[in-house]
Amino acid sequence: MTVTTNLVVDLVRAANHLSKLPMADRRRLLERSIAASSALRDLLVKNGKIFPIDASTEQVIDDIARNVELMSDETVAKALLTLADQIRTLGILNREPC
């Protein structure tokens, strides 16, 4: 499995078992995923590829990460699953030929 695939698996697993995940780990996973998503999006731009993902999603999730203690488990789980989908999509787009 690739690093991207492993991250997507970690995100889905965390979303499904969120009650067992400490707040610090939730924050770190969200921050790591935001960085990965941003890097994949930047790679698409660098290679001149068009992509259908809005960067504002990462801004909202970044706010969730900074205030994770105040967020419901449902909100954090949705953020994790949104990032998993976004990273998966960006990974696929980065493998497609121009």
Image: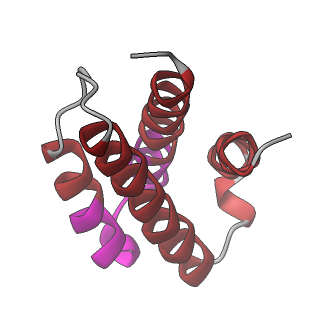
Where residue 26 sits: x, y (%)?
55, 69
Residue drawn where x is 86% and y is 40% of the image: 1
Q: Give the range drawn in magenta.
A: 62-79
Residue drawn where x is 51% and y is 17% of the image: 96
Asked if residue 47 is positioned above or below residue 35 in the image, the reply reads: above
Residue drawn where x is 44% and y is 53% of the image: 76
Where residue 34 sits: x, y (%)?
39, 59
Which quadrant of the structure image shows residue 95?
top right
In the rendered image, the residue lying farthest to the right is: 1
Examine the structure image and report whether residue 64 is included in the region drawn in magenta.
yes
Indicate left or right for 28 with 69 as reference: right
Asked if residue 14 is positioned above or below residue 63 in the image, the reply reads: above
Asked if residue 85 is positioned above or below residue 58 in the image, the reply reads: above
Give whichever of 6, 77 is nearer the camera: 6
Indicate left or right for 58 with 28 as reference: left
Indicate left or right for 54 with 96 as reference: left
Q: Can residue 67 be seen in this view?
A: no
Q: Is residue 19 visible?
A: yes
